[in-house]
Amino acid sequence: MLALWGLVAVAARPVCEPSGCGGAHALSACPLSTTAAADLVLTLSPTNLYFFNAAPHAVSINYVSEDGAEKPALRMASGTRQEVSALAGELWRARALRHGHPQDQQLMLEHHVGLVSLKDCDCPQPEFVDCAKPPHLDPRTTKVDPVTFVNDYGAPLDLFYWNGTCEELVSWSDIGGVQPFARKHMRSTHGHTFRARSAASGKMLMQHTLTDVVIRPCETTERGGVAPSSSPRAVALARATADLARNNELLKRAVERQLALIMLSVQTSTRTDAVNRSFARGSTAPACTDAAALPGSAFGIPGKAWF
């Protein structure tokens, strides 16, 4: 049993961006395109994407179809912001529009629209402050920006809306917490921040803010540096490396899910054996009539609050 837990800890250690713990998004040079294409995922509603062009020149926002072909969707001048409606699984790319310049059509961003994966990012632990207010119900007075979370933590968790001062439970309808691999669809608003906490201990796992997809200037070309090698062999090698990294990440996630399923199966089997032994000795199962006694709320909240 301990060996299996060790295997889970080593193989399923998540990799998180600094923003997963409230830090700034990592900055990097322009990416190299991969052979990735759209791979649609069924969700309750489309997602609103907000592109912001922070580059000193115009860019083209292209949709990548399922066969890998790019289709221009809109053009953006420097300093402008545009909204597009997208589905989970879609792939979008931003390319430079610099007619007559060597970097014309250079790839500046590759954004994969996906579910928000909730996992343990080993964040610093801020003090939990309960907003202590009733659930917020529709009708809303702000624009609705749908977001779908998926529990990749491997154990039940609670999802909170953080307003900068206190936290409000929004997964109140999930008795016992959002279960492993379950999805939680929210009608939110752009700019809102959510925090995921362990349903058992209250530990903050990560946080996620609905932010713009920012198109930044390439560090190597916009700051007087040398552009990366563009020889066919170098480009092919870079793309192959990027594809391997992406496939490795997909395989890693699949292993994480399988290991978590194994652990759930072992725990369920252990509990079942314990109950069977208890009945065999003539005892009865305890009745649970107090909703607050149900597992899942780290703070004694019987599944109430919504934003």
Image: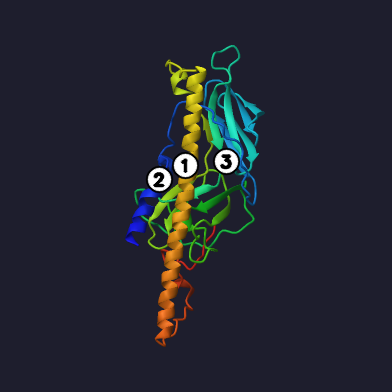
Residue 123, placed above or below residue 229: below
Q: In which quarter of the image is residue 59?
A: top right
Q: Dot 3, how many residues are within 10 Å of its Cα: few (below 14), some (14-19), or many (20+)?
A: many
Q: Which of marks 1 and 3 is nearer the N terminus?
A: 3
Q: State the mark number for residue 21.
A: 2
Reading the image, the residue beneath label 1 is 249
Quadrant occupied by the C terminus: bottom right
Q: Which of marks 2 and 1 is nearer the N terminus?
A: 2
Residue 148, placed above or below residue 283: above
Residue 302 versus residue 133: which sits nearer the camera? 302
Q: Position of residue 120 (x, y in %)?
A: 40, 51
Q: How many marks?
A: 3
Q: Dot 1, how many residues are within 10 Å of its Cα: few (below 14), some (14-19), or many (20+)?
A: few
Helix, strand or loop at mark 3? loop
Foreground: disc 2 or disc 1: 1
What's the residue type where badge 1 is placed?
Glu
Residue 126 visible in the picture: no
Q: State the mark number for residue 113.
A: 3
Whole-number angstrom distance, CA of label 2 to CA of label 1: 20 Å
What's the residue type where badge 3 is placed?
Val
Residue 150 versus residue 233: which sits nearer the camera? 233
Quadrant occupied by the N terminus: bottom left
Q: State the mark number for residue 34.
A: none
